Image (spheres, rainbow, N blue to C red):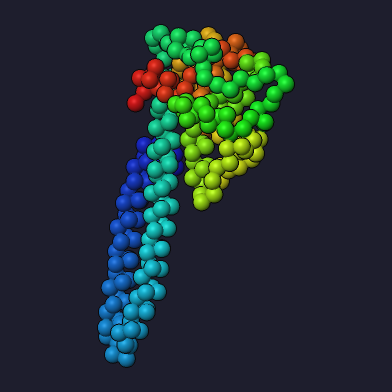
Amino acid sequence: MYPFTDGAKSFGDAIFRRLLAIVIFLVSAGGILYLSAVLMAKKDVSFEGAKDIFNVVVPLFGTWVGTLLAFYFARENFEIANQNVRELVAQVHPEQKGPQTQVRQMMKPRSVIKSIALKSSESEANVKLEEILKLTESGSTRVPIFDAAGIVKCMIHANTIHNFEKSILPNKLERAMLLSDFMKQAINGNPIEALVTAMAFVRTDADMADALAAMTKVPGCQDVFVTANGKANEAVLGWLTNTDITQALNIR
């Protein structure tokens, strides 16, 4: 037996999902109509009794239909999303023809980055949210924290703080909270520590396609830092956001 090609599999899956949707609709509609006919034929069943039976059976049909449709059609959406990401990266693969824009041409130099710069005796763990909020409330949407050597320790997005604040309502955000305590929290099950440390790194001789490839390798990453050799333990020379990268590569 010859193996199916990817196209044949996709076509077969699409046909199967269409047939499944039709069968589920017919079975559920037929079941409800059949139940209605049976209840109407039984003279010993009161109106209240029939209504109670409907209130129990109809939600069961709905749950069954919803579960099956969610399983098959949500999986399709997930596969489409993954395929879109693969195509996005393929569009700007480093090996594609034509000159590439270099990261050093597009990056924001370290000297102009609004950030929290720690002294040699200070640790990012002891930074208070209030210090970060002063920057976000003055217009910065992302606040990197650098140690005394210029190494980036984490990146705090204003949205991360905002979403955490919404998640703890009706409690209020403690502006005096230490960053170490903030990073121990979670937003909808997502650890904040993972969110604020999702960063990628590239060399100074990398191009924008390299930056995109590095960013997509780190789950949830939206920030790429440029260092001499693309290492996380090196002083940052520049910074690129996900918006910088997609605009430079003309990705919509």
Residue located at (41% from left, 8% from top): 99
Q: Residue 4 location in percent, x, y? A: 41, 39
Q: Position of residue 73 (x, y in %)?
A: 38, 49
Q: Nearer the viewer, residue 109 or 137?
A: 137
Closest to the observer, 248 or 136: 136
> In the picture provided, is 90 more to the left or to the right than 234?
left
- The answer to whether residue 64 is left or right of residue 36 is right
- Give the mark count: 0
111 is higher (above) or lower (below) than 164: above
Name the quadrant of the N terminus.
Answer: top left
Q: Is residue 109 left or right of residue 251?
A: right
Q: Is residue 212 above or below residue 40?
A: above
Residue 171 in the image: state x and y as whole percent: 54, 49
Quarter occupied by residue 2: top left
The residue depicted at 52 percent of the width and 37 percent of the height is: 161
Q: Nearer the viewer, residue 198 or 161?
A: 161
| Residue 231, image quadrant | top right
Residue 1 visible here: yes
**Relative depth, front residue between 14 and 71:** 71
Q: Residue at x 55, y 21 (%)?
A: 115
Q: Is residue 169 left or right of residue 179?
A: left
Quarter of the image containing the C terminus?
top left
Residue 111 is situated, as x and y percent measured from the top left of the image, at 54, 11
Q: Residue at x 40, y 68 (%)?
A: 60
